[in-house]
Image: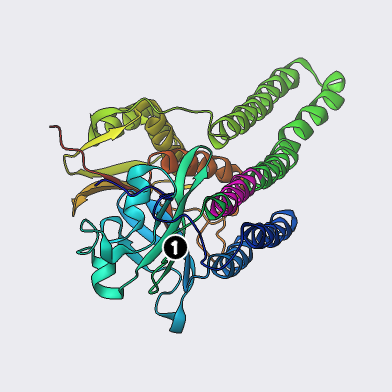
Amino acid sequence: MKYPKFINEEEYLSLHEGQSELELLKKFSSNLKLIHRLTTKNYTDLNLLIKEYLEVGVKIFSMEIGIVSKIDGEEYTICDVISPGDTLISGDKFELQGTYCREVIRSNSILGFPHVGKMDEMKSHPVYQNMKLESYLSAPIYKNNIIFGTLNFSSTSIRENGFSEYEKELISMLASSIGSFLVLKDKEEKLENAYKRIRKLTGYVAHDLRTPLGSIISIVDIFPDLDEDEKFEMLEELKKAASSGLEIVHSILEVSIVGDGKVSLDRDSFILSDIVNESIKENERRFKAASLSFVKSFDSSLVLVDKERIMQVFANLISNSLKYSKENSVVTISIKNDKGLTTFEIQNQVDEKKVSFSPRGVTESSSIGFGIEIISEILSLHSSELKIRKNEDIYIASFSLPIHHNK
């Protein structure tokens, strides 16, 4: 549609009849002070910031309704709102097509509609038909140069003298400030998550490396007093302890790389059962050495994944079943298709002496914790989630992926 000019100097020469330019400047100055107080206030809570911005905006623009929205594709979600009688509430979702904000997103600019009922293109709009909102002022909110949503104010009253350039600047300031806060909160959350990850990895190092390093030190201390046969045996033990420590270091590095988002997926379409069979084949000897057998039941399904990363998922899940299953037990692996999803599941009978479980079903063993951490990060990159549960002594791990259809 052809949008009206934000301010038409011929039609809206005076913002408010009877007010001089000096009076308008005084009002603008007063409004600037209100906004300055908002922008210099140290907010820690996003909801409080939005609420106060809306309260000030409703006052400044003499409107009835104030909304901060989040727009995701064609979905419009109210983040927070001020409206008479609470006719609108936070969390309400609408199709973008059915909102005035559709025009803001389409034009990618600040828009002011002083009298919607006079606009032939807007008279049939659902918002006008249902709520008779005559005036509307809105600015896009940008987060990292991408539109997050809108800051908008509306009223059933007509703005006889339109909107001024002052008001355009004021709503721009408010929207820009909200966007800056959103970016800042993202940075703070990333720093907090990074700090938590560092503490977690430090905990892993302190706990898991203590055992192999302690073994190495103990062997070195007694090594000079051993005879030749004992030295040969201790060298084997030394090699095992060093290998265990190296495996832990590799795991820590893998967790760090994947968790920091430094991994970019190289997706392609694969038959999931082919990838699983490849992982099983690589571990056949280990199954026999551990006195384990396995039963498999696979539905055929095509998935869009990074094969190398998904192989890591299977490698860790199968490795856990090999390490913590009872001898002479059976590991069951299945792939089942249902409602557009294919679900991989692995079950094994756990030796309770080797591993324990928390009330939430997540293993308390930090050794398994490494594997779980890596699996969870990789599946998250594939928009999936690892689910772990325990039924008596049966350990069950599963995740689902969308079935991919080649076009």
Q: Is residue 245 above or below residue 330?
A: above
How far from the left and from the top, in percent, is residue 346? 35, 48
Q: Main secondary structure of the magenta part?
A: helix
Residue at 63% over, 30% down: 244
**Which residue is at the front of the view, 167 or 14?**
14
How far from the left and from the top, in percent, is residue 276? 30, 34
Residue at 38% over, 44% down: 383
Q: Is residue 252 above or below residue 345?
A: above
User: Which contiguous range is marked in magenta?
Assistant: 170-187
Q: Tell me: 122 left or right of 76.
A: left
Q: Is residue 36 above or below residue 234?
A: below
Q: Tell me: 76 left or right of 175.
A: left
How far from the left and from the top, in percent, is residue 158? 38, 70
- In the image, residue 371 lies in the stretch drawn in magenta: no
- Res. 288 visible in picture: no
Q: Is residue 50 above or below residue 385?
A: below
Q: Quadrant of residue 403?
A: top left
- In the image, residue 174 lies in the stretch drawn in magenta: yes
**Which residue is at the front of the view, 82 or 278?**
82
**Which residue is at the front of the view, 201 or 11?**
11
Which quadrant, please, contains the C terminus?
top left
Q: Tell me: 315 left or right of 25.
A: left
Residue at 26% over, 74% down: 130
The residue that label 1 is drawn on is 161
**Which residue is at the front of the view, 174 or 330?**
174
The residue tagged with tag 1: helix, strand or loop?
Answer: loop
Q: Residue furthest left?
A: 407
